[in-house]
Image: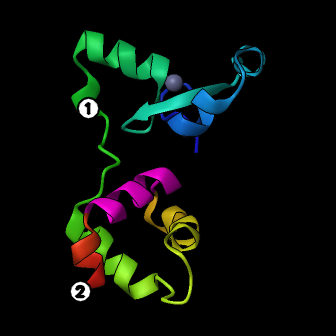
Amino acid sequence: MNCNNCGRVLHERSRWRMLPKADRVALRHGHAMHMGRGLCHGCYSRAQRDGSVIDHEATVKPWAYVLDEWKRLADPEASRVENARRIAPHLGMTVAALERAVTRHREDVAA
Ligand SMILES: [Zn+2]
């Protein structure tokens, strides 16, 4: 996934933060942490300052849609993490975001 504004390669926040600082500095050109709405940290901050964040489409999917797709695609034999890894790209979500959503709505998923 690339930043919709500057095209830098986006990394999930948790993965980006786990990289040693030297690696983040080395990767700075052409890579960035995903902040939200398909934007890197820098572009998101700029958009927030100039009030144009709202112009960028939210990447968060309504839970009802995510739940339907999860129920349709999740393999009951596989773990939540394995399912999240497989289904997240299909939903255009990061693995971490899908895992968080599924964890937050455990009761709905089990139903
Ligand atoms: Zn950017």
Residue 93 image position (x, y, % from top left): 45, 55
Residue 51 image position (x, y, % from top left): 22, 16
The number of numbered badges drawn on the structure is 2
* Quarter of the figure with the C terminus: bottom left
Residue 33 image position (x, y, % from top left): 55, 29
Q: How is the image coloured?
A: rainbow
Mark 2 or 1 closer to N-term? 1
Q: Secondary structure at mark 2?
A: loop
What is the magenta segment's predominant secondary structure?
Answer: helix
User: What range is drawn magenta here?
Assistant: 93-104
Above-or-below relation of 91 to 15: below
Q: Residue at x 46, y 58 (%)?
A: 92
Disc on res. 55: 1
- Label 1: how many Cα within 10 Å (few below 14, some 14–19, many 20+): few
- Badge 2 amino acid: Ala
Q: Residue at x 29, y 78 (%)?
A: 109
**Residue 102: in magenta span:** yes
How far apart are the alpha carbons under marks 2 and 1? 36 Å
Residues at discs 2 and 1 in contact (Cβ within 8 Å): no
- Badge 1 amino acid: Asp
Q: Is mark 1 within 8 Å of ligand 1?
A: no
Residue 90 image position (x, y, % from top left): 50, 68
Judged left or right of residue 16, residue 106 is left
Residue 82: quarter of image:
bottom right
Q: Which residue is mark 2?
A: 111
* Quarter of the figure with the N terminus: top right
Judged left or right of residue 8, residue 42 is left
